[in-house]
Image (cartoon, grey):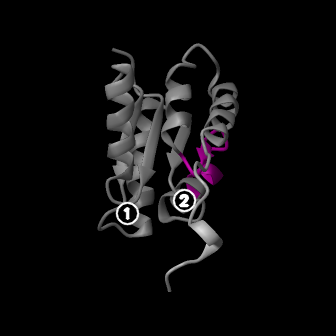
Amino acid sequence: MSKARAVVAGHAEFASGVVSAVVQITGRDDVFLSLSNRGMSTQDVERALREMVTPDDITVVFTDLPAGSCTMAARRLQRERPALMVVTGTNLAILLDFVFSAEHEPAEALRAGVEKGRAALMITGSGPVGGSRAD
């Protein structure tokens, strides 16, 4: 089994949930490590991320929110490790594309994955009839 290629970090069970979905769909449990910020300070998140990325020389961190504590911690790590890439607004489509792009360099795989993630966002239906809303 190969070592992990990336960390997924976010609020509550976001990371473990999307990583679990990736494993169910792909059968690959060796691509991602997950981190929840539940009950952690920003410094705790940064320390945990540092421990996760250093041993395996991971160069990618996926996070849920652009200005969340996981993203801020990952961005601080980027100052020490300029090769570290951070992807915010992560969704399942991005992670699946990353898994299936194992033969590509991480930066190339991320560019393609982000495009797939954007393309996966859509609205179906027309919303409330007459445009009314309940206040």
Q: Is residue 103 left or right of residue 49?
A: right
The circle drawn on residue 65 is 2
Q: Residue at x 43, y 30 (%)?
A: 56
Q: Is residue 95 left or right of residue 103?
A: left
Instruction: Say what amino acid the circle numbered 1 marks.
Output: Asp
Q: Which sits in the foreground, 42 or 94?
A: 94
Residue 79 lies within the magenta run:
yes
Q: Which sits in the foreground, 66 or 115?
A: 115
The circle drawn on residue 10 is none
Q: Residue at x 56, y 27 (%)?
A: 97
Q: Secondary structure at mark 2?
A: loop
Q: CA distance from mark 1 to mark 2?
A: 17 Å
Q: Which residue is mark 1?
A: 44
The residue sitting at the front extreme is 130
From the viewer's perspective, is residue 117 above or below residue 26?
below
Q: Is residue 106 left or right of residue 58?
A: right
Q: Residue at x 37, y 25 (%)?
A: 25
Q: Secondary structure at mark 1?
A: helix
Q: Position of residue 36 (x, y in %)?
A: 34, 55
Quarter the N terminus occupies: top left
Q: Position of residue 45 (x, y in %)?
A: 41, 59
From which residue to which does the magenta span run?
Answer: 76-90
Q: Is residue 26 visible?
A: yes
Residue 62 lies within the magenta run:
no
The residue sitting at the bottom extreme is 135
Q: Position of residue 68 (x, y in %)?
A: 52, 64
Q: Residue at x 37, y 37 (%)?
A: 19
